[in-house]
Image (tube, grey):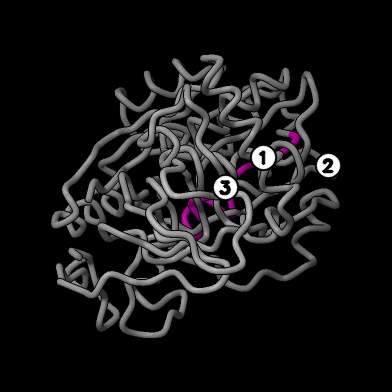
Amino acid sequence: MRAIRISAHGGPEALEPAELDRPAPQAGQLLVEVAAAGVNFIDTYQRSGLYEVPLPFVPGVEGAGTVREVGPDVAGFSPGDRIAWAMSPGGYAEHAVVPARNAVRIPDAVEDRTAAAAMLQGLTAHFLVNSTHPVRAGETALVHAAAGGVGLLLTQLIKARGGNVIGTVSTGEKERLARRAGADEIIRYAEADVAEEVRDLTDGRGVDVAYDGVGKDTFDGSLAVLRPRGTLALFGASSGPVPPVDPQRLNSAGSVFLTRPSLAHHILSREELDWRAGELFQAVAAGTLDIRIGATYPLAEARTAHEDLEGRRSTGKLLLLP
């Protein structure tokens, strides 16, 4: 099968097209013909070595496709089923083995590409607004990178819960996308001081929660704009990891809360995965949640996809199409 392999950590050039043996499903696994694989920042972290993964490996932790073989000890799935998954490696390939515990069926009303684009970022947005800081009607949230894959979904889910969104973006095109998703206010972070703008927009009160997937470049500003006892949910590091933080800063900022959640800890059980994915797919099928696919690439152009993602030249979701 055709695949992308990483044999040594590095930049996008470390993504090597390769011909590999098609894997066979073991106990508890499904062999899936991959229709679409999501491109995510976690892929770049693993590629660079920021997140350690034994070499060599096939990147890609999210995708959708059709079950071709079912391994031993698997119940509830059959060849021909359309499934989507997240947090399972090997997606940058024509075929992938997926643990059945990570797979969810795709409803008839949802296309494969949409399902692939909804999983990792959609599940992340779901746990952030439902579990990390359950948004209540009337609350105000700061959403960094509001035109990115998670940002657009976060904005829609926050608005569906009755919250208000202040989003940060870099360009006019991204501002239009974020406003279309429901953002109430937009700050162009390259043209204005985000902390000052947020204080003005909230009459000095600050936001109830800051959802920050950018990391190093935005962390200080996110901390500075929280209301007393507000929450900073740091869920990514697209600009680099945040340096160590003195806990006293949380006191000085107003007895605020800092958390660094990850998706894996929010889909630990079958019930939780089905709940989150079910609500997402239901909203997509009903037309109340828009999954924006910003660009698609042939499998061999995985390097270009990583360059576009890391260069902040993308909006919405990027997909590889084996």
Rendered view: 22 above or below 224: below
Which residue is pictured at 14% across the width and 57% down the height? 300
The answer to which of 226 and 301 lies nearer the viewer is 301
The residue stretch that appears in magenta: 208-221
**Left or right of 280, for residue 53:** left
Q: Quadrant of residue 242?
A: bottom right
Give the amino acid at mark 3: Asp
Rendered view: 293 above or below 254: above
- Badge 1 element: helix
Closest to the camera, between mark 2 and mark 1, is 1
Closest to the camera, between mark 1 and mark 3, is 1
Mark 3 = which residue? 212
Q: Quadrant of residue 64?
A: top left
- Badge 2 element: strand
The answer to which of 253 and 41 lies nearer the viewer is 41
Which residue is pictured at 41% across the width and 85% down the height? 54
Is 316 included in the stretch rendered in magenta? no
Where, quadrant-wise, is the N terminus in this rendering?
bottom left
